[in-house]
Image: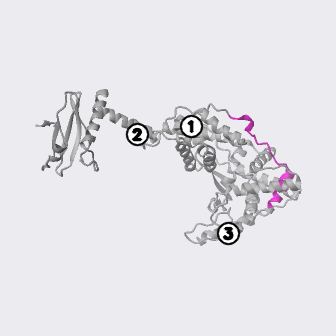
């Protein structure tokens, strides 16, 4: 039978250990619950609060006893804890259930992530999806959100308001930034959309992942600044394009050859092109397989034909980076000045900018960039009556949406793309030579193909 008595320090210290654990309880008023001590065989003494609710006894730990208070609680400390538990018991009717509920609430709040966690999660998703924009988006968030607004960044993402978004963008406007204002807004909008979907993804809950607790997107109420939206209009004419082609000769060999190759391919997205390695070229079929990760969906294959004109532009890169490799080693990438390391996209961007600056100085040609070159290619292809759908597949504008496009349309348009690039090659050759189309004598396709195939086979044999 459990004994009832008042606990004092001398009484607790005098309790002796027994072969089996035993308990003693202190007398208390009815309904208050009792203080309980349990003595273990090793002499350790543990205190508990025992109370009754709904005709059921419940026990709550109060701590281990240590008269000195170093490795546990003193009796006075135990009594302080007991008073707190009794107060909660009077208020709630079940202190243990109340504490468990508080713990669950605290855990749920801890999972509700900060704005920084939201922005990081979004950029991590972009990288996992092989989106080339991941680095730029991360830089925008760091420079324009996290660093200038540390308190906001550390706060809950769910507490960010439209006024906070306005403040972020207003700072950029005051700094004289224009186009990136709308870009920052678009990326913030996408990040909050991502967080909202992640909250409702069963996999997030199953993994006990961070929950942002988003119920709306605060960016939605902040309008796009229309005057900062620059619709690209710069298109080079044939004379400007001829000067651009010749102006590339001033660049280092790899940059010159890469930009000429891309022009021969009707200006593909340069970030995709420079990621290609030699194994992505199939010289037996005269094709190049790129991976297009732009857009909302997963990366997709983008197959391009290699015309004679394209192979001509590729030849300098093959001579520099197309040599044999040892077995087990990764061969050089085509678009590199240092072997295995691909050229940075900024290198190409700066190269086009430098050529544009030089042409503005020498020929009074208005400035242009890589987007203008890509726009020029599409405009010229349109003028050449190349079908819109063929242009879309050639320049990888993406597969049509909907069930049909997503699940069933798998035709690669390779024949149509080859015909378009052959037509494009004649057009570009006429522009850069200044001769009529009839006077252009192309390099024999068979000879160039066999020469190229032989060089690639030598690499494969060596590996």
Residue 107 image label? 2
> Upstream in the sequence, badge 2 or badge 3?
2
Quadrant placement of the N terminus: top left
Q: Residues within 10 Å of mark 2 (few under 14, many from 20)?
A: few
The residues bearing labels 1 and 2 have C-alpha atoms spaced at a distance of 24 Å
Secondary-structure class at tag 3: helix
Res. 50 image quadrant: top left
Mark 1 = which residue?
A: 193
Which residue is located at x 70 percent, y 44 percent?
392
Q: Which residue lies at the image location 83% right of the left edge and 56% below the top edge? A: 358
Q: Is residue 219 visible?
A: no
Residue at x 62%, y 30% (from the top left corner) = 221
Q: Are marks 2 and 3 in contact (CB under 8 Å)?
A: no
| Callout 2 secondary element | helix
Cα–Cα gap, marks 2 and 3? 62 Å
Say which label, 3 or 1, has the lower sequence index: 1
Front-most of 333 and 399? Answer: 333
Instruction: Estimate the x, y position of residue 129 in percent, counting from the top left.
Output: 57, 48
Q: Is residue 44 visible?
A: yes
Give residue 230's position: percent from left, percent from top. 75, 40
Residue under pointer 3 = 455
Task: Give the residue at x 23% y 39%.
Answer: 48
Per the rendered image, the range of residues in magenta is 224-248
**Marks 2, 3: nearer the viewer:** 2
């Amino acid at each position: 039978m459990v004994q009832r008595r008042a606990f004092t320090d001398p009484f607790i210290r005098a309790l002796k250990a027994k072969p089996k654990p035993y308990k003693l309880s202190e007398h208390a008023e009815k309904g208050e619950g009792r203080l309980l001590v349990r003595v273990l065989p090793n002499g350790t003494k543990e205190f508990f609060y025992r109370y009754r609710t709904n005709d059921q006894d419940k026990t709550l730990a109060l701590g281990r006893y240590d008269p000195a208070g170093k490795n546990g609680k003193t009796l006075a400390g135990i009594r302080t804890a007991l008073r707190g538990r009794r107060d909660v018991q009077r208020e709630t009717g079940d202190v243990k259930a109340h504490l468990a509920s508080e713990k669950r609430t605290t855990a749920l709040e801890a999972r509700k992530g900060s704005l920084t966690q939201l922005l990081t999660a979004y950029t991590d998703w972009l990288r996992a999806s092989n989106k080339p924009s991941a680095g730029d988006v991360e830089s925008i968030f760091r420079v324009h959100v996290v660093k200038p607004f540390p308190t906001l960044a550390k706060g809950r993402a769910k507490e960010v308001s439209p006024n906070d978004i306005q403040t972020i963008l207003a700072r950029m406007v005051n700094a004289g930034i224009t186009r990136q204002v709308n870009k920052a807004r678009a990326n913030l909008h996408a990040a909050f959309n991502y967080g909202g979907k992640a909250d409702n993804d069963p996999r997030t809950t199953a993994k006990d992942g961070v929950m942002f607790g988003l119920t709306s997107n605060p960016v939605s109420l902040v309008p796009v600044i229309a005057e900062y939206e620059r619709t690209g209009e710069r298109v080079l004419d044939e004379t400007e394009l001829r000067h651009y082609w010749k102006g590339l000769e001033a660049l280092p060999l790899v940059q010159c050859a890469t930009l000429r190759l891309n022009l021969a391919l009707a200006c593909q997205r340069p970030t995709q092109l420079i990621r290609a390695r030699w194994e992505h070229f199939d010289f037996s079929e005269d094709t190049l397989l790129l991976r297009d990760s732009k857009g909302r969906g997963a990366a997709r294959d983008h197959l391009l034909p290699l015309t004679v004109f394209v192979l001509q532009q590729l030849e300098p890169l093959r001579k520099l980076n197309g040599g044999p490799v040892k077995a087990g080693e990764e061969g050089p990438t085509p678009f590199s000045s240092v072997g295995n390391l691909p050229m940075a996209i900024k290198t190409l961007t700066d190269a086009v900018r430098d050529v544009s600056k030089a042409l503005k100085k020498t020929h009074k040609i208005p400035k242009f960039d890589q987007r203008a070159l890509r726009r020029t290619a599409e405009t010229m292809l349109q003028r050449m009556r190349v079908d819109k759908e063929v242009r879309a597949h050639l320049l990888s504008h993406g597969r049509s949406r909907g069930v049909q496009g997503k699940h069933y349309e798998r035709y690669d348009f390779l024949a149509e793309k080859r015909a378009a690039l052959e037509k494009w090659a004649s057009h570009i050759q006429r522009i850069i030579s200044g001769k009529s189309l009839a006077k252009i004598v192309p390099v024999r396709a068979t000879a160039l193909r066999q020469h190229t195939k032989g060089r690639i086979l030598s690499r494969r044999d060596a590996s």
